Every structure is written in C-alpha cells, then in structure tokens.
C-alpha cells in the first residue's frame, strides 16, 4: 500500500518540540505494516522556502528517510477536478491541489495531512474518506492491523450539565466566542442558567476530561438574523464540540440530534457558529445536509438542516444525503435484500436493544463505525444492477434470520481482487481488518458505500416466506419487487413521515 504524507505532519511534530505520541505510533505502525510512505517533491520545495532556517533543516532531515514522489500528475485547467474545487489562488494552493489530484487519480491509496483546506476540498471531490489527519490515520491503521476487530467500551453518557466541570479545557473555545467586549460574562451566565434548569448534555469522557460535548434545545421562536427566520418549532444544537478526533463522534452527535428531533416530532435542526477558515465542524455538518441560511450582525452564521424534502427534482441519493433520515422508496427505486453475517452486522449497526440507549444515552459496547451514518459493506455478489439511490434491506443471517435494517446506496465500486483497491474504496469507513480484506479479495469483491437510515421491527424468515417476500434464506444480494417491499415496509414499521414516494 502506498500513502502520501504531507510535510505539515513533520512540521507539526517539530513545532511541538517532542513528537506527540499519536504521531510516533502512527509512523511505527505504518513501518510495521509495510506501508510505503511517500513525500511529494512539491511539498519539499515548499519546505525549502521556509524562512525559519532551524525548522527547515529539521524537517528536511526527516524527509530524507522517505521516498520522494518525483513523477506527478497535474490537473488540467478547466478539468472537472478544477471546476469542483476551483483554480489555485496562489502557489501554496497550487501545491495543495496537485497533492490532492494525485489521490483523486489513485496514484496513492491515502493521504495524511493536517491541512483543513485540503480536507474540505477532498469532501467536495467525494474522496474525504481517503484523506486523514494524523489521529484518524492512527485509529484506522490500529484497527486495520488487528487479526480480529473487537468492540470497545463506550464512554458516551447523557448527564446533567450541572455535573460537568466548567473549567474543562474543551469549554475554552466556547468561552472565547462569548467572552468579548461587554459580553465577558455571557457564557458563564448561560451555563449557570441551563444548569439550574436541569438541562442535560451528551458527553464523551476520556481520562483527560471531556472529549466531546453536545447540548440540544427544543425551540419555538423566530431566529433573529439576516434574513430573519420565521417563528417555528426547531431543534437547536446549542453546543457541538469534539476534541477526541478519529472516533466519528461528530457524526454520532449528528445522528443523536436527528433521533431526538424525530422522537419529538421536530422537522428542522439548526446551529449558530462563528465560521473559521477551513472549519472542521462546517465540513462535517454540510456533508449531512446543513446549509447556510442566514447570518447575524456579529458575523455568526446560521446553518439549518431539514429532515423532510422541500424541493422538487431531487434524486433518491440526494434525498438520502441532504434530507437524512428521509429517503425515496417509490416505484422507480430498486430494492435489494443484502444478507450479512452477525460478526459484520455487530460492527456496522447498533442492535435494536442497544439502540434504545441512544436516547437518553449510550453505554455498553461499540466500535467506531457503529457511530456513523455513512457505512461500507463488502460483498462477493456478482450483481451488477446496484446504483446510487437504491434501497438496501439487510438480512442478518445465522442467528436472527430476519431483515432488520434499511439503508440507501451512495456509491458502488465494481468487483476487484486487489486488496489495496478495496481498502482505497472503503477508506475511513472500513470495519474490516487487513487479513479479512485479503481473504475476501481471493474472489472478486464489491464495495458498497451506503447511508444507514432505520432499524425495522425485525421481520423473521418465517414471516418473509409466509408473506411471499422471500422463498428462503438469501445467500447473496437479490432484488425485491416494489409490491413485496410494500408488504415488508408495513410489517417492519417503517416511519412513513420520512419516506418519499
């Protein structure tokens, strides 16, 4: 496997005087796994222009240990790549685009960089699952190396705000947003107020303190902004902050917010945010349908997500992404049954019993990918008709012998026997170890990227057969007629508030 490393990784290590443990572990792990690490020649040229002579010498000495990518792919002016992310505005921007273009054209499997501008461009290009920061890369390769992927203890709890440590470092950035000018006590006053009201928060605890924090509020009022937003019942995300990266907690918080809104019959979710350059939070929320709708006089932006489609002409895959959890299941949408073994099911999905803990809280066992909305599944099926927007109905084999999950296809990658191509296509969404991927790649393997939408009331095999939905236990991916789907949909209790016919 070939991966590209940005020189800011090395600069980051040096600027911190002592190499952070996560970066040291990452490089040790990559070397142990035999991953080929490359540095691009244009990155080196940038380092040579650094006016800090000491830092330049140190970084160049570190780069000497890695092969240099001297043959490079250059995006053409006016190409689809350039139209998507825009032409470079300066020399540094040009270098970033070239590095990213080499990932886009599959010259490397992954790219590790701390540059948020590159991460944002990768999102627009649809390759964000192949662009890591250092912590994400470490988390990925730790799991990838294991002989067997195991469940890890979860530390996400729903607790009273009054029980939290006001002096926890995670709150410092929030205090900074509030505590300016005459409003120096605004954040503290707000914190005291919501504590006395008995408000609660979702918290990810670590040994160092709070690793992530989510605070929600049910509102029914006008939003003062330009343009003003009319009075309406909405769910406000008051606080959304994640310092423990690489665990998909941000995506989990979005899922928790959506579940809360659904449970309380709320159709819109919004948050206010002082947007910064290459903002990680905005990058995340835009991926799941939040859009900028207004601004306030102080420069604060307002982002809104609608849970139900409000425009004509959106495709099935667009509805699944932009208006999640809504999805299109009309006559023109193809439906497929996907058999899945329990060991992979447990990695991808929270069991229905576990799901009841989502609200008010989550505890017990999890792995990173159980936190996500977007997931990846590998199949040896030879089916060729799967496409974006199709519905997937997951049948858990062996023990449950029931259809329990409904999802929507985002991307499908054709069958291949190249393990590197498989892992490249799966990207950050992998729930498979290196050995499992190698074993599967003996035969042609298809990668399906999909959005998880809903748990169904489990529809057991006996019922599926009695109702004529299936003739027997599915052995591979198979199509299902719309008429049979309608029967399954009724038995499985699909929430029709979020279906588009």
Image (cartoon, rainbow, N blue to C red):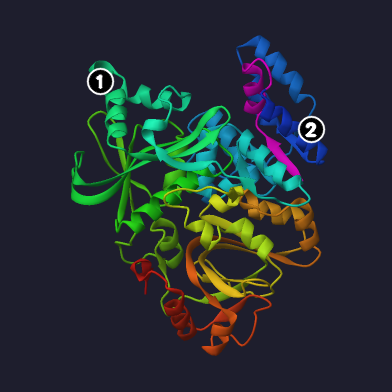
Query: Would residue 15 appear left or right of 309 to someone viewing this image?
Result: right
Residue 35: x percent and y percent? 78, 41
Disc number placed over residue 231 in the picture, else none: none
Vertical relation: 83 (above or below) 437: above
- Mark 2 Cα shell of 10 Å, populated few (<14), some (14-19), many (≥20): some
Query: What number is the disc on residue 67?
Result: 2
Tell me the magenta residue range: 1-19
- Foreground pick, 429 / 397: 397
* Rendered location of residue 184, percent (x, y): 28, 18
- The residue lying at 35 percent from left, 31 percent from top is 274
- Is the residue 96 above or below the residue 423 in the image? above
Residue at the image position 65 percent from the left and 52 percent from the top = 430
Q: Is residue 271 visible?
A: yes
Let me know if residue 3 is in the magenta part: yes
Q: Nearer the viewer, residue 137 or 48?
A: 137
Q: Residue at x 32, y 45 (%)?
A: 270
The earlier-in-sequence mark between 2 and 1 is: 2
Image-quadrant location for residue 329: bottom left
> Residue 357 location in percent, x, y?
48, 53
Query: Which quarter of the figure is the C terminus placed in?
Result: bottom left
């Amino acid at each position: 496997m070939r991966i590209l490393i940005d020189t800011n990784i090395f600069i980051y290590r040096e600027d911190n005087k002592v190499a952070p443990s996560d970066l040291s572990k990452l490089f040790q792990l990559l070397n142990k796994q035999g991953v080929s690490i490359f540095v691009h020649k244009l990155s080196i040229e940038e380092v040579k222009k650094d006016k800090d002579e000491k830092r330049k010498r140190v970084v160049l000495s570190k780069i000497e240990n890695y092969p240099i990518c001297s043959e490079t792919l250059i995006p053409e002016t006016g190409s689809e790549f350039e139209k998507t992310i825009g032409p470079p505005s300066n020399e540094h921007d040009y270098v970033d685009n070239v590095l990213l273009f080499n990932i886009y054209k599959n010259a490397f499997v992954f790219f590790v960089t701390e540059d948020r501008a590159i991460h944002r461009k990768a999102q627009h290009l649809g390759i964000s699952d192949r662009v890591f920061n250092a912590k994400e890369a470490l988390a990925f390769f730790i799991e990838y190396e294991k002989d067997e992927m195991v469940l890890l203890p979860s530390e996400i709890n729903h607790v009273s705000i009054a029980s939290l440590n006001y002096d926890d470092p995670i709150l410092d950035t929030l205090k900074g947003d509030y505590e300016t000018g005459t409003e120096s006590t605004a954040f503290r006053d707000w914190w005291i107020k919501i504590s006395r009201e008995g408000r609660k928060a979702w918290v990810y605890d670590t040994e160092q303190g709070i690793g992530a924090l989510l605070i929600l509020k049910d509102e029914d009022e006008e939003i003062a902004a330009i343009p003003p937003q009319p009075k309406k019942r909405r769910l406000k995300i008051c606080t959304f902050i994640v310092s423990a990266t690489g665990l998909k907690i941000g995506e989990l918080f979005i899922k928790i917010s959506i579940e809360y809104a659904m449970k309380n019959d709320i159709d819109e979710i919004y948050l206010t945010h002082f947007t910064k350059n290459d903002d990680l939070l905005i990058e995340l929320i835009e991926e799941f349908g939040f859009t900028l709708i207004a601004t306030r006089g102080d420069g604060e932006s307002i982002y809104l997500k609608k849970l139900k489609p409000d425009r004509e002409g959106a495709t099935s895959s667009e509805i699944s992404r932009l208006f999640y959890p809504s999805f299109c299941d009309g006559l023109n949408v193809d439906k497929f049954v996907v058999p899945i073994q329990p060991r992979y099911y447990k990695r991808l999905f929270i069991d229905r019993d576990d799901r009841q803990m989502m609200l008010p809280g989550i505890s017990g066992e999890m792995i990173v990918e159980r936190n996500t909305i977007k997931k990846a599944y590998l199949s040896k099926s030879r089916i060729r008709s799967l496409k974006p927007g199709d519905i997937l109905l997951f049948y858990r084999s062996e023990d449950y012998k029931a259809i329990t999950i409904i999802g929507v296809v985002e991307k499908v990658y054709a069958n291949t026997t190249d393990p590197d191509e498989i892992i490249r296509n799966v990207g950050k969404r992998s729930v498979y170890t290196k050995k499992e991927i190698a074993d599967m790649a003996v035969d042609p393997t298809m990668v399906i990227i999909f959005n998880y939408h809903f748990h169904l009331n489990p529809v057991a095999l006996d019922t599926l057969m009695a109702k004529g939905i299936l003739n027997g236990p599915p052995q591979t991916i198979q199509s299902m007629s719309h008429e049979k789907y309608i029967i399954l949909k009724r038995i499985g209790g699909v929430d029709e508030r979020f279906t588009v016919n």
